[in-house]
Image (cartoon, rainbow, N blue to C red):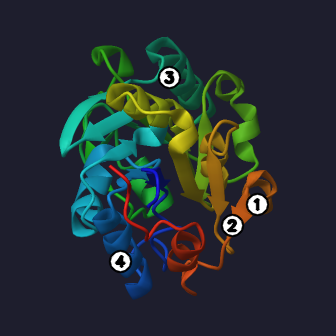
Amino acid sequence: MARKRYLFFDIDGTLAAGGYGETFIPTTTRMALDKVRDAGHFLAISTGRSQAMAIDMMRDMGFENMVSDGGYGVTIDGELLGITPLPRDKVIACIRECEELGFPWGLQVDNSTTRLVPDERFVDFTHDVYMDSRVVPGLDPEDYPQIYKAYVACFAPDEQQLKTLDDLPWCRFHKEYLFVEPADKAFGIRKIMDHLGADYADVIVFGDAMNDVSMFVDGWYKVAMGNACDEVKALADYITEDVITDGIWNACERLGLFEPVDE
């Protein structure tokens, strides 16, 4: 019999292949998740996506638990326990600098699939299909008590002109714009483990991209996908195969996660 483990999976490049707009879950990944779940382990998603952007995929794969919003959102047993916003004053300073430099921008001020933009420039610049954009004429970040994410339209390396980014977490997934968003998945994982009263040593994380570095920390076991970036692989305790060549199945099997938990 195996001891109960707490598994946290990134989505894109780890559970899912194909990229935005063409995402699919390999059959062996779904099979592995079912077997691990049936064995009695705790399963959760750990994603940079907002909870609203990830909830459908979470349910589709049979998950009820999730670290979202780059570590700042926590969902347990299907219930969102809360999302910690970004530091409001620093985000507002960033937006003001964007306005000075002429960079189109947007905000996410609630748990939804829609960003707010002050005009059409962000959409015209990015042609983005990742999420919906809603124009709010006269949009002012000062009007919102909580800001969860911000978006800045510019090509690399133009973001180097934004000195306010030095005080904020940010990343770039698209060439046309960057995300100002939380980047501490370990923070959310610890919140879930503390809520459950479980031991950090029983955590196993699975990831592939730079934003997964934030959960590849000491104190628990780390699995990198074969398609992971070098930075993630360098921190991993184990490197499995690519997401599309049974990487999740093989890792779970080799780590003994199909064995029933000793309750």
Residue 119 against residue 236 in the figure, above or below: above
- Mark 4 / mark 2, whichever is N-terminal: 4
Which of the numbered marks, if any, corresponds to residue 30? 4
- The residue that disc 3 covers is 91
For discs 4 and 2, the disc positioned in front in the rendered view: 4
CA separation, marks 2 and 1? 6 Å
Q: Position of residue 98 (x, y in %)?
A: 57, 31
Marks 1 and 4 in Cβ contact (< 8 Å): no
- The residue that disc 1 covers is 233
Amino acid tagged 1: Lys
Q: Where is residue 64 in the image (x, y as percent from the top left)?
A: 24, 52
Marks 4 and 2 in Cβ contact (< 8 Å): no
Marks 2 and 1 in Cβ contact (< 8 Å): yes
Query: Would residue 125 be found to the left or right of residue 173 on screen?
Result: left
- Numbered disc 4: secondary structure: helix
- Mark 1 / mark 4, whichever is N-terminal: 4
- The residue that disc 2 covers is 228
The answer, for residue 263, to whether it is visible in the render is yes
Marks 4 and 3 in Cβ contact (< 8 Å): no
Q: Around disc 4, counting alpha carbons within 10 Å, would you say few (fewer than 14), some (14 to 19), or many (20 or more)?
A: some
Q: Where is residue 140 in the image (x, y as percent from the top left)?
A: 34, 22
Query: Would residue 250 be found to the left or right of residue 163 on screen?
Result: left
Give the residue displayed 49% in from the left and 12% down from the top: 89
- Mark 2 / mark 1, whichever is N-terminal: 2
State the image quarter where residue 173 is shown.
Answer: bottom right
Residue 13 against residue 250 in the figure, above or below: above
Marks 3 and 2 in Cβ contact (< 8 Å): no
